[in-house]
Amino acid sequence: MVRGWRYYIDLVWVLTVKEIKVKYKSSVLGYLWSVLHPLSLSLVFYFAVKLVLRIPMENFVPFLVVGLFSWQWFSNSLSSCAVCLLGNASLIKKVLFPRYLIPMSAVLNDLFHFLMSLPVIGFILLLFKIYPSLPWAYGIPLLLLAQFSFTYGLGLMVSAINVFFRDLERFVNIGLNILFYLTPIIYPSRLIPEKIYPYIFLNPLFPLIENWRRLFLEGALDFFLLALSFLWGLGSLCLGLYLFQKFSQRFAEVI
Amino acid sequence: MSEVVIRLREVTKSYPGYSYITSGFKNFVFNLRRALSGIRKRFIVLQDISFEVYRGETVGVIGRNGAGKSTLLGLIAGVIKPDRGQIEVRGRIAPLLELGAGFHPELTGRENIILNGVLLGMTRREVMNKLEQIIEFSELREFIDQPLRTFSSGMIARLGFSVVMHLEADILLVDEVLAVGDSSFQKKCWQKLCELREKGVTILFVSHALDQIEKFCNCVIWIDNHRIRAMGKPSEVVSIYRVESEWK
């Protein structure tokens, strides 16, 4: 069945709206949850890293908040991608529509919550006398696009493989934990020892998180890091779509 | 009765023994030998199935549990892929393989209609235009803005059926879903199916209700032991099937 692009937009729309609605339908605090979690993490790391370990840094709170919120988008997307196909088993078995839209709606759902938390980030920046600047206008969409492509590509792989190998879900959560501490989120990248520093470029999240912080804290976008992010994004998308396409033929019989 | 809308040519479908993989890493490692042979060993569900369905026909599919009837509809719907053989389908399919497939219990009836309608192939605008008709047909107007988890299974079935009936499809695949709902709603569903048939919609119909098949279909396919055992006039095929299943 070939239908126009309008139909695909509608499909993505209803699937994403479903995710968003379902997430908060039966919770009292609703939207606040997507903000409260990273905020409480910020407090914890402020205590542990700034007060106890006494990291030499100014404006540590906005530094943490920007890093943690963008990390949350990536990490939440990936863990929901891991289970998204199993969670939609009846759809996959009984209805024909492009399956790659299911992990996409999972990533878009968390993107929505990230967008909704941008005002909170802006407010915290204001408290520390950091004001919006012009580069935000093009920097935010560019970084959103870069992070979306990388996350979605990885999400496609994770969701497809998890159908056949359900332990992957646990590996994903362990992997996310490891990646969290390997990425300069709760510490600045300049504190990384020189010996190890070159290897940081192997971490696909490093250029993203670093750039989000440059953008929000210094009002500038690093175009080398941005190019690197897009490269990672493209690679991840290609591999993700390829693997997903290969596996998706057999989804209905395994789920 | 001229144009072929569904054509299957020597279609074979088998399922692999995936259980050792999907049951996790530990099971896979500890049962490595059995797991690997499980991947190679496949269970044949349908073998060398060939038939044609013409536009406007109403075809019943009968057979014992596990004979492969649902797999057949799944193949035609395109949800699963055959190992071998070709499947050609012309026109828009409305798969009624499970009532309310993809419904979400936390969403309201109305939200589920929109979600389901789009998933089944309508644009949002098309669903919106038909929303009133669908709600009217389901007779669930007073509950339509309640979350679906408060609905009874019969009510959910009604809602699912109402959405599919308004898809304007060329081919309708119905998998044993008409047994739900109270008798008055069942009657309404049959009326609607007859209406669609009059309009020239092709219907493929899996059921154990032999009386209905005899009355409603103009061709019956009997699947037995993964193959087509017989195909032809409902009265003939059904009567042999009846005799045989009683004898067993």
Image (cartoon, helix red, strand yellow):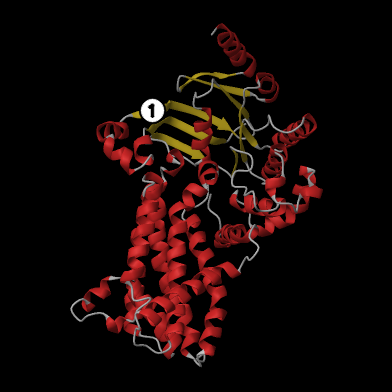
- Looking at the picture, how far across and down is residue B139, in whole percent? 80, 43
**The residue marked by circle 1 belongs to what chain?**
B
Q: Residue furthest top?
A: B247
For this orientation, the residue located farthest to the left is A195
* Residue B117, horizontal then vertical, whole percent: 64, 51
Q: Nearer the viewer, residue B196 or A53?
A: A53
Which is more toward the observer, A64 or B148? A64
| Residue B174 located left or right of residue A187 | right
| Image coords of residue B104 (percent x, y) | 62, 49
Q: Based on the displayed image, in which of its 4 quarters is residue A172 positioned? A: bottom left
Residue farthest along the front direction in this orientation: A52
Say above or below: B57 vs B235. Answer: below
Q: Residues within 10 Å of mark 1 (few under 14, many from 20)?
A: few
Q: Nearer the viewer, residue A176 or A73?
A: A176
Q: Amino acid at mark 1?
A: Phe
Say above or below: B151 vs A218: above
Total labels drawn: 1
Residue shown at the point (26%, 75%) measured from the top left: A200
For image coordinates 46% across by 52% down, the residue present is: A83
Q: Quadrant of residue A59?
A: bottom left
Residue A143 appears in the picture as rendered: yes
**Which secondary structure lies at badge 1?**
strand
Task: Work out whether B208 lies above or below A248.
Answer: above
Asked if residue A241 shows in the view, the reply is: no
B109 relative position to A144: left or right: right
Residue B109 image position (x, y, % from top left): 71, 50
Q: Residue at x 45, y 85 (%)?
A: A216
Residue named by callout 1: B43
Q: Quadrant of the C terminus of chain A?
A: top left
